[in-house]
Image: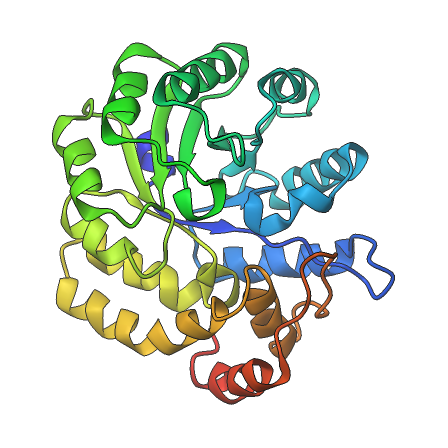
Amino acid sequence: MLRTQLRGTGTALITPFQPDFQVDYTALESLIEYVIKGGVEYVVTLGTTGEPATLSKEEKTAVLKFTLNKVNGRVPVVVGVGGNNTAELIHELKTLPLAGAAAVLSTSPYYSRPSQEGIFQHYKALAEASPLPLLLYNVPSRTGSNVTAATTLRLAKEVPNIIGIKEASGILVQCLHILRDKPKDFLVISGDDHFALPLIACGGDGVISVAANAFPAKFSALIRLALKGDFSGASTLLLELTEGIDLMFAENNPAGVKAFLATYKVIQNYMRLPVVPVSAPIMQAIEAYAPTVAS
């Protein structure tokens, strides 16, 4: 069932802030409505794009409750619970109000750079503690270590509560090994907007997207075309959005996507340090490009 629910486009929701840097719940509600009306298949709250590293435990709980309430079962909600303190994450999994969510997404431990055995044991412990199915998240450019295909497949085959991976390594050969050898129902989801189409062409299940915050209609249409095998139509849309995706990641995530959303008047353009807004030249380029692909 989750393979069907989490197939397609998931939006990695940003966390909007007010000028005083408090969470902007009015803007968060607007964003939720914007992406659901745009046609995304599910949303991810408290993922790394949502700046959870600068949210307090109380804020994380409040954002999660608010999101579940406003989504109200219209699409599945995946919850980000990741970090490099395994024991603390187990505590979060046991205390966060996860009822009503579909799954947990957990980035591999950052900075610590554990061995592959350490990564395996970390995820095994989380999966055993989690009341929800667990998605792995491999993003070496941010964590400093890669979850290899061998480790992913070992987790997929040996730990029943692990149901898939968000793969953002950009290593096609690694992804091909996972797609070839994975259990039948194990989800392989792109964690990179540019990489989603080629991954689907090789058998992937969709994307957890940053760009779908700003372009939910066009990006989710692109992914649906790809999943139906219409790679010509999907490629046309991807090429149309490529400049926007490039601008979105030119300096920092989520600064780029927040700049787009501010241009579309969905949120205000604020983020917490150490993240800062995009530079004036990038903002000018975004303001010039954004009207061409508003969805």
Question: Residue 20, image x and y in percent?
Answer: 87, 61
Q: Residue furthest right?
A: 20
Return the residue nearer the eye: 73 or 78: 78
Report the quarter where the N terminus lies: top left
State the image quarter where residue 62 is shown.
top right
Question: Residue 70, image x and y in percent?
Answer: 66, 45
Residue at x-position 24% and y-position 30%: 149
Would residue 1 be visible to someone looking at this image? no
Up-down relation of residue 22 to residue 258 (above or below): above
Report the side of 260 relative to 61 (left or right).
Answer: left
Report the side of 158 relative to 97 (left or right).
Answer: left
State the image quarter where residue 116 is shown.
top left
Up-down relation of residue 40 to residue 79 (above or below): below
Question: Residue 95, image x and y in percent?
Answer: 70, 19
State the image quarter where residue 236 is shown.
bottom left
Question: Residue 173, image x and y in percent?
Answer: 16, 43
Residue at x-position 27% and y-position 75%: 239
Would residue 76 be visible to someone looking at this image? yes
Residue at x-position 54% and y-position 11%: 129
